[in-house]
Image (cartoon, helix red, strand yellow):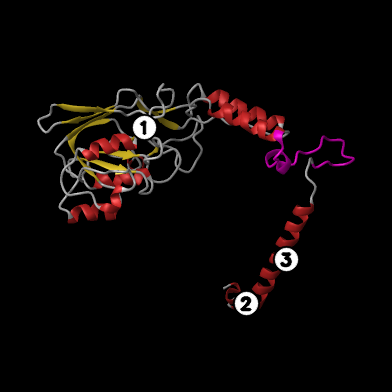
Amino acid sequence: MPHAVLARLPPGSVRLVIAFGLLLLVSLLVLRRRPAGPLARPGDGRLPVPDPAALFLSLSAGANASIAADLRALTAGPHLAGTPAAAPAAAHVLGRLRAAGLQTLTRDYAPLLSYPGRASSLALLRPDGSPLARLSLDEPADEGRRLVPPYHAYAPSGAAVAEAVFVNLGREEDYAALERLGVGVRGRVAVARRGGGYRGGVVARAAEKGAVAVLIAGRADGGVERGVVLLGGPGDPLTPGWAATDGAERLGFDDEAVKRRFPKIPSMPVSAETAVAIIRSLGGPPIPAEWQAGLGVDAGGVGPGPTLVNFTYQLNEAPQLVS
């Protein structure tokens, strides 16, 4: 209760809280009464300063058309950082901000980036190793393959031919449930569905349990989720805590602090459709009822096997410094 909190504060703190509350109330009243439009500075000889609220919060037809045009320009195609397509996107944003009268500047950085390749593959094999089905690694909605291929940034290249196990969200409690069923992932491919926390943690946990690769499915009503699988927080792993400029000091790839940030096994995002095809081919104990809703799975078990997953993930090239 608010009054109970105030009662435990010293008298001076109570007065400070009340004063702050009154100041906040007055500020809100002033903002509510402030007329919309540019904030002019009479007599100073300079151009009016644009009002951010008028620029970005207007509901006028012209503003909506401008916002729609910006969204169209920035979402018409992929523009991964460090690729040629990123420059026009940056120039568009820079031009729009300058046109709005805002002071802008740019800085050049050379971070460590990774890019997807087209050499990845996924297939189901019969227990004797003969082909059963080739599975798609594309995004279902991307029929023309115009988008960035699904991939996990900084995941290592690798290959595996192994039985699969459905690990639900890939949390500790999911592995505990599998253990109670007598199922483990050591030497196997873990198939998870999105929603168990940070994807990098899902991959790291599977590696700790002995899995040789991880496939993470998107939700049944969505696409394929790309993203980073680095550990240890955001930022360039070679310049932790400082800017990745051209002349910046960098840690080496053999530095223990750097190696700890990279996943130890390959992983890749897949569509729910692809994940369901794998799970339906699995035997073993039945899928727990609470695990079925996320992907709409109506058949199959948690594994392992008896079918084998033949998975190859190939980066376009190793993570590289891009300026």
Residue 50 lies in magenta, yes or no? yes
Alpha carbons under labels 1 and 3: distance apart: 52 Å
Q: How many marks?
A: 3
Residue at the image point whose x is 73% and y is 41% from the top: 54
- Give neighbour class at mark 2: few <14, some 14-19, many 20+ (Cα, 10 Å): few
| SS under mark 3 | helix
| SS under mark 1 | loop
Residue 108 relative to residue 192: left or right: right
**Dot 2 or dot 1, earlier in sequence:** 2
Is residue 283 or residue 314 the one in the foreground?
283
Kind of residue sitting beneath label 2: Pro
Residue that protrudes farthest toward the left in the picture = 128
Q: Which mark is residue 151?
A: 1
> Which image quadrant: the N terminus?
bottom right
Quadrant of residue 130 within the rendered picture: top left
Span shown in magenta? 39-61
Relative to 173, residue 72 above or below: above
Where is residue 55? Give x, y as percent.
71, 38
Q: Which residue is mark 2?
A: 10
Is residue 138 or residue 213 the one in the foreground?
138
Kind of residue sitting beneath label 3: Leu
Kind of residue sitting beneath label 1: Tyr
Residue 10 relative to residue 31: left or right: left
Where is residue 129? Give x, y as percent.
12, 29
Where is residue 140? Give x, y as percent.
38, 30
**Dot 1 or dot 3, earlier in sequence:** 3
Where is residue 120? Give x, y as percent.
29, 26
Is residue 226 or residue 293 the one in the foreground?
293
Alpha carbons under labels 3 and 2: distance apart: 19 Å
- Give neighbour class at mark 1: few <14, some 14-19, many 20+ (Cα, 10 Å): many
Q: Which mark is residue 206?
A: none
